[in-house]
Amino acid sequence: MALPTVEPLTPPTGSSIDFGATINNVDLENLTDDTFSTISNALHTYLVVIIKNQNSLTPKAQYELTRRFDPSATQYGHGKTVDAKRSILHPDLKTIPHQPQVQVIGHGFVKEYEGLKDIHLKHPHHRTFHRDAIPDEDDYDFTRFYRWHIDAALYDFYPPRVTTLLAVRVPNGRRQTLRYDDGSGETMDVPLGTTAFVSGERMFELLSEEDKEFVLGSRIEYAPHPYIWMSPAHSRPTGLGLYSENLELPDSELPPIDPAKIQVLPMVWANPVTGKPALQIHPSAVRKIHLKDGSVIDDLARVREIVYNLQRPAISPQYVYAHDWEEGDLVLFHNRGVLHSVVGAFGEGEVRLFRQCNLAAGEGPLGYTGTSAA
């Protein structure tokens, strides 16, 4: 078999993306150390990598590939929190019975797949999360970013290092216009059901020197049980964080809280291979900002506004990679170096079937100190 090759993505016309690559000539069912090293180096260099024609990849091989990035990791990235009926993640996931670290996501009715029978999948639609939805009559042609995020429980479990996504079944053909609807007038032409990615490294680069100094000295405290906490709240139209309407659940209405499990993470994470800094914040789950001088910003509306202003420039269209899925595509992304969002609104009879795997990490992300990770 030919040696693996890595080909950086060519940005489309008008795009300024500087990440993403395709890897060819790999056998993931019989993964050698040398091939894995090629994949790992490419992933940490290009942040998102695509391996085509993986239709026959087994859930076990997908899990073993994902775990190879973090051998200490064994369980799904959210633990069992998605079992909580009030979690906003609960409706979106089905667990493969014989490989419980691998989830099935998508849209439509699937008669049988990997031990699951008669499953009804539901693609997250922005109208269930955004305060102001696109009118129904425009829903077929227009869409939004659903929710920009990092794959992470952000309570108890450390953020996964890597997520793998396999396209099993993809609806063909049509495209949609993605609207920002934030007064900017920005739009994107996107494939139906795309997954959108932005680079946390570019997000950091776009900051002013003053903002870089601020984020390097600050940490984010995330809400306990964040996906239950935020469940009554509403997103901005860009999918980048929430409006402050005092709708979040109080601590008294959350599952029991162990203060030791509340996560306070750096705003800027270091790439463990290249050392590059990435601004990595899950905007919907933020609760407080811990400043360099030891003080804490705990006004939620102010916290959200600060985070939004730091992140918003990097989700403009020229910085977004919207993957055009084909059946058999396996996409790996460096979950500690990118943010991503579900996109799209499916019509009647359009079925989408994907497999997702990410594993709660054995260690927290490395903070970037300006010269080295710490």
Image: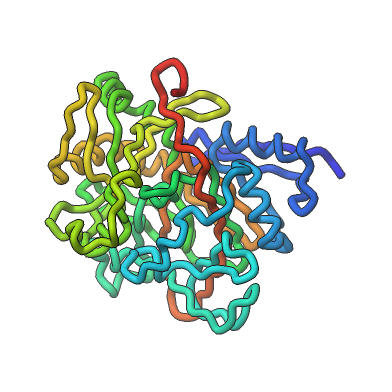
Tell me residue 175's x, y (percent). 46, 62
At 35% across and 46% down in the image, what residue appears? 261
Q: Could you tell me if residue 339 is visible in this image? A: yes
Mark count = 0
Q: Quadrant of residue 228?
A: bottom left
Task: Compare residues 252 and 2 and report the one nearer the observer.
Answer: 252
The quadrant in which the C terminus is found is: top left
Tell me residue 256's x, y (percent). 28, 59
> Does 368 appear above or below 249?
above
At 45% across and 62% down in the image, what residue appears? 80
Q: Quadrant of residue 8?
A: top right
> Does 361 appear above or below 236?
above
At 37% across and 48% down in the image, what residue appears? 154
> Does 217 appear above or below 358?
above
> Does 205 appear above or below 241?
above
Tell me residue 345's x, y (percent). 40, 68
At 74% across and 51% down in the image, what residue appears? 28
Task: Compare residues 129 and 223 and report the one nearer the observer.
Answer: 223
Scheme by which the image is coloured: rainbow
Q: Is residue 15 left or right of residue 230?
A: right
Task: Compare residues 170 and 157 and report the one nearer the observer.
Answer: 157
Q: Is residue 277 left or right of residue 255?
A: right
Q: Could you tell me if residue 345 is visible in this image? A: no
Q: Quadrant of residue 44?
A: top right
Task: Compare residues 14 and 4 and report the one nearer the observer.
Answer: 4
Q: Is residue 344 left or right of residue 359?
A: left
Q: Residue furthest right?
A: 1
The quadrant in which the N terminus is found is: top right
Q: Residue furthest top?
A: 371
